[in-house]
Image (cartoon, rainbow, N blue to C red):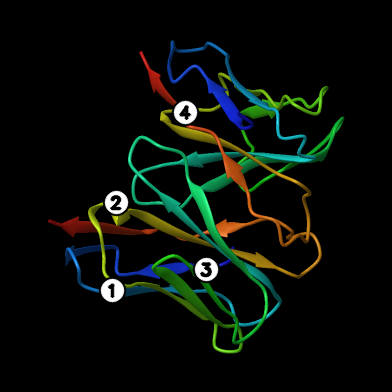
């Protein structure tokens, strides 16, 4: 089945540690996204990539980094500079980015907590 | 920062009843309005992408309308079933350059009471 796979489902981070969240898609989509969800807030965009080897900052990029070396993969690193990383992280993809009428497809999410 | 608001925040509806809720968004620089359904322990699932003022879309017992001039969209569920229990998210895509990304509302959490 085609879809988006996020791993791990749960992740714990120690103080001062960088952690990487995996997102893989086999939908052959060009665009991929990372969102963060906090209680009482809408999904907020961290980073997005409209094509391989290119990505842009979203609304809350500070303390995060990404790479897009392969079309199917868009890993998110939560660095030690992110002071409040505890949240639910969702990865999504779409056929194309930018001004598009295409919906986004989402993974199941990763819940990150601080030890 | 764009303002996308959904109301009510939560809703309890008796099985078999119909219901509706609202998404408000900026009435200028409109490109598209997305609706997603997010069931507990699952991933969000796209319902509709709406682009034209006056547009109406339907999927089973769920339908949506769009008014871009006044900046709102309604989602209707006719004859609610327990499987309709979910959080319904709307997301606005503006047409102004450099802002080609979705802005999500906080969602309406719908609970169907058997």
User: Marks 3 and 1: CB-CB under 8 Å?
Assistant: no
Q: Kindly check if marks 4 and 1 are in contact, taking CB atoms under 8 A apart as contact.
A: no
**Pointers 4 and 1 within a single chain:** no
The residues bearing labels 1 and 2 have C-alpha atoms spaced at a distance of 14 Å
Query: Relative to residue A58, is residue B114 depicted above or below?
Result: below
Marks 1 and 2 belong to one chain: yes
**Label 3 is found on which chain of the structure?**
B
Q: Quick one: label 3, few (<14), some, or many (20+) residues within 10 Å? A: few
Of tags 2 and 3, the one toward the viewer is 2
Whether residues under marks 3 and 4 lie with C-beta atoms below 8 angstroms apart, the answer is: no
Q: Name the residue under label 3.
A: B3
Residue under the image location 77 percent in, 50 percent down: A97
Q: Where is residue A99 in the image (x, y as percent from the top left)?
A: 78, 61
Question: For the point 81% across and 65% down, which residue is it?
Answer: B97
The spot of residue B38 in percent (x, y) is: 41, 48
Which chain is home to disc 2?
B
- Please give left or right for residue A35 compared with residue B77 in the image: right
Q: Can residue B106 be seen in this view?
A: no
Label 3 – label 4 distance at C-alpha: 24 Å
């Amino acid at each position: 089945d085609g879809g988006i796979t996020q791993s791990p489902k749960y992740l714990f981070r120690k103080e001062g540690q960088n952690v990487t969240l995996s997102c893989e898609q086999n939908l052959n989509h060009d665009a991929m996204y990372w969102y963060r969800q906090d209680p009482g807030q809408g999904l907020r965009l961290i980073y997005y990539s409209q094509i391989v080897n290119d990505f842009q900052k979203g609304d809350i990029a500070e303390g995060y980094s990404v790479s897009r070396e392969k079309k199917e993969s868009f890993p998110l690193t939560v660095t030690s500079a992110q002071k409040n990383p505890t949240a639910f992280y969702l990865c999504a993809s779409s056929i194309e980015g930018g001004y598009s009428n295409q919906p986004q497809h989402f993974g199941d999410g990763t819940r990150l907590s601080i030890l | 920062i764009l303002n996308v608001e959904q109301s009510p925040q939560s809703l309890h509806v008796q099985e078999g009843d119909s219901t509706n809720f609202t998404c408000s968004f900026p009435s200028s620089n409109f490109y598209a309005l997305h609706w997603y359904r997010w069931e507990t322990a699952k991933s969000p699932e796209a319902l509709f992408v709406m682009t034209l003022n006056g547009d109406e879309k339907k999927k089973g017992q769920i339908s949506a309308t769009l008014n871009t001039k006044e900046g709102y969209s309604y989602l209707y569920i006719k004859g609610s079933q327990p499987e309709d229990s979910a959080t319904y998210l709307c997301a606005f895509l503006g047409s102004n350059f450099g802002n080609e990304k979705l802005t999500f509302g906080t969602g309406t959490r719908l609970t169907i009471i058997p």
